[in-house]
Image (cartoon, coloured by chain):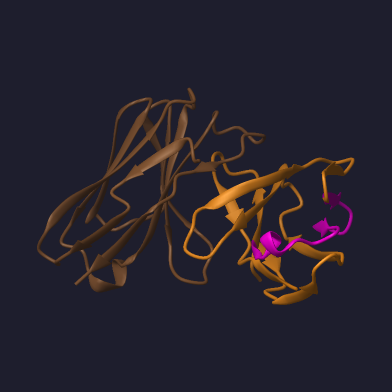
Chain colours: A brown, B orange
Amino acid sequence: DTEVTQTPKHLVMGMTNKKSLKCEQHMGHRAMYWYKQKAKKPPELMFVYSYEKLSINESVPSRFSPECPNSSLLNLHLHALQPEDSALYLCASSQDSSYNSPLHFGNGTRLTVT
Amino acid sequence: RKEVEQDPGPFNVPEGATVAFNCTYSNSASQSFFWYRQDCRKEPKLLMSVYSSGNEDGRFTAQLNRASQYISLLIRDSKLSDSATYLCVVKGDSWGKLQFGAGTQVVVTP
């Protein structure tokens, strides 16, 4: 069982919808991440939060808006998405963002944009 | 040139056999290295960190060759449950940023 919990597991949304993905961890990790993964490709980094502050935004379109309400929670707000945004969205956490902290992934939200 | 490269496979391995594959990285300043496994339509799961002196976890052995800039993973006595995609992950000089290889697919057959 994963110690990083993501909800929902599956999401279908239209291009005009607004939805949010949620991620929670209780391992005391201080770095949290959003990744996007397309079929047969490796995960692509979207955002990194370190100590609840956004530290990396990999030039992600503004239709994706991250939020870190506290050290245990990470949200990804979605608005006006495109069909090509359909993918597996993975949340991850690590003890911190130092070199030796491996990532622990949640089981992902499979998003379909219609 | 990609920062992290892996042979995509598939490596078809009879049950009980040994399989090994490498991952090369381009940034000589890379500091940390990990192997993850990912099952179809599931999240990546940490298999093992890779240490400079090499390390072993049960049937899995990881090695780091800094001179040639590659890491390797060896699986002994392969089980059907070892069938997965193995992702090489390298953490370099960018704070918080990891580089993922595209993965090596391993298929263990009865």
Q: Residue at x 75, y 75 (%)?
A: B11
- Farthest residue toward the left? A16
Closer to the camera in the image, B61 or B16: B16
Q: Quadrant of the C terminus of chain B?
A: bottom right
Q: Is residue A75 visible?
A: yes
Q: Check the image and report above or below for A20 versus B19.
A: above
Q: Quadrant of residue A89?
A: bottom left
Tell whether position A86 is magenta. no
Residue in the foreground of this view, choosing between B39 and A114:
B39
* Residue B41 in the figure: left or right of residue A66: right
- Left or right? Give the position of A48 relative to A42: left
Q: Which residues are magenta?
A: B60-85
Quarter holding the N terminus of chain B is bottom right
Residue A67 location (% of width, % of height): 27, 37
In this view, A50 is above or below A85: above
Residue A98: where, in percent of width, then height? 60, 32
Residue A96 lies in what quarter of the image? Answer: top right
Residue B72, x across and y down, in percent: 81, 57
Q: Is residue B70 visible?
A: no
Residue A100 vertical placement versus B105 (above, below): above
Residue at 44% in and 38% down: A4
- Which residue is painted at 41% across and 53% down in the image? A58
Which quadrant of the view contains residue A50?
A: top left
Q: Who's the residue at 56% across and 61% down the image?
A: B39
Does B79 appear in magenta? yes
